[in-house]
Amino acid sequence: MVRPLLLLVVPLALLGSSLVSADFYSHRYGGIALQATDLNDLCTDTRDFVGQLNSTNQVATLSGCTDGGEGAKLYAGWRWSPNFAVEADLRQTATSTSNFVVSNPQFPRLAVKDRLTSRMGNAFFIGHLPVGRSGFSVFGKLGGGFWFNELRSLQRGEALAVFQLEDGSLQPVAIPVEGTFSDTSSGFHWGYGAGVSYQLKDRWTIRAEWELFPEVGNEELRGDYQVESASLGWSIHF
């Protein structure tokens, strides 16, 4: 009876070792990534917006605009085979700021500082191409999701008020004014990307990737633009 038991134990041991080695290809993961993000065309849209404020009695001048910076994302997914995975993420892209000055008969000088914050949620299908048994994998991704933009505007300057004096003459007086307002907009988008990942001890993965979202934003809030990002991420398997 000893020999048949040994014959049974050996295949089970081999099967167990194969399942352990295959565990990496059937796992869930969660991670965080730091991004360098460009909001392509956003400053062009802002320049067009400021240009449209010009009229016969009003002059508007753009003094500065930024459309790039740092961002971050949280992501989680399931890689059920060496070649395929699904993934979802939440991210905040770079914050865009712009400054312009408006001058008209009512407001001799009104300085406006806008701050546009973009947040996104995405779902992707990912195809992997492992590089032998080195732990490296090249991947591409395709998907889409939603975007949410918030515009906060600080306006500071002088308003011209006209008062009638006792003798009947009119006296113009400049009065300091300051105010803030906010507006929001949302919609859906699609995107794609590519990158390379490296597995560490069947427990961790680090990866570098590039992503592009061609259609974010709308005409209601400074126009549409592209979100392009390069990121470095780290994830844990569970």
Image (cartoon, rainbow, N blue to C red):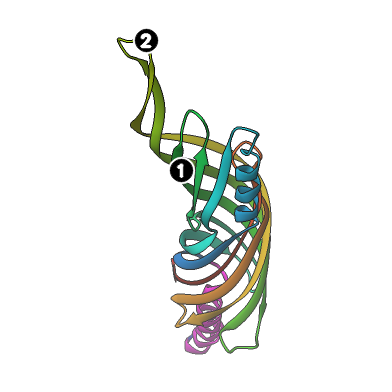
The magenta stretch spans residue 5? yes
At horizontal 43% and vertical 76% (from top left) the residue drawn is 203
Split into 4 quadrants, where in the image is the C terminus? bottom left
Q: Nearer the viewer, residue 98 or 221?
A: 98
Predominant SS along the magenta part: helix
Position of residue 96 relative to residue 180, above or below, is below
Label disc, if present, on residue 181 of the rendered structure: none
Q: CA distance from mark 2 to mark 1?
A: 36 Å
Q: Which residue is mark 2?
A: 168
Q: Label 2: few (<14), some or many (≥20) within 10 Å?
A: few
Residue 128 vs 107, above or below: the answer is below
Expressed as whole percent of the image width and height from the top left, the position of residue 180 reads 39, 35
Q: Amino acid at mark 2?
A: Gly
Relative depth, front residue between 196 and 56: 56
Question: In the depicted view, which residue is nearer to us: 147 or 236?
Answer: 147
Left or right of 162, for residue 191:
right
Which residue matches tag 1? Answer: 112
**What type is the residue that disc 1 sits on?**
Val
The crowd level at tag 1 (other Cα within 10 Å; few <14, some 14-19, many 20+) is many
Q: Residue furthest left?
A: 166
Q: Is residue 230 above or below residue 50?
A: below
Q: Can the viewer see residue 217?
A: no
Q: Nearer the viewer, mark 2 or mark 1?
A: 2
Q: Is residue 161 visible?
A: yes
Q: For the magenta stretch, what is the residue range?
A: 2-27
Residue at 60 percent across and 88 percent down: it is 133
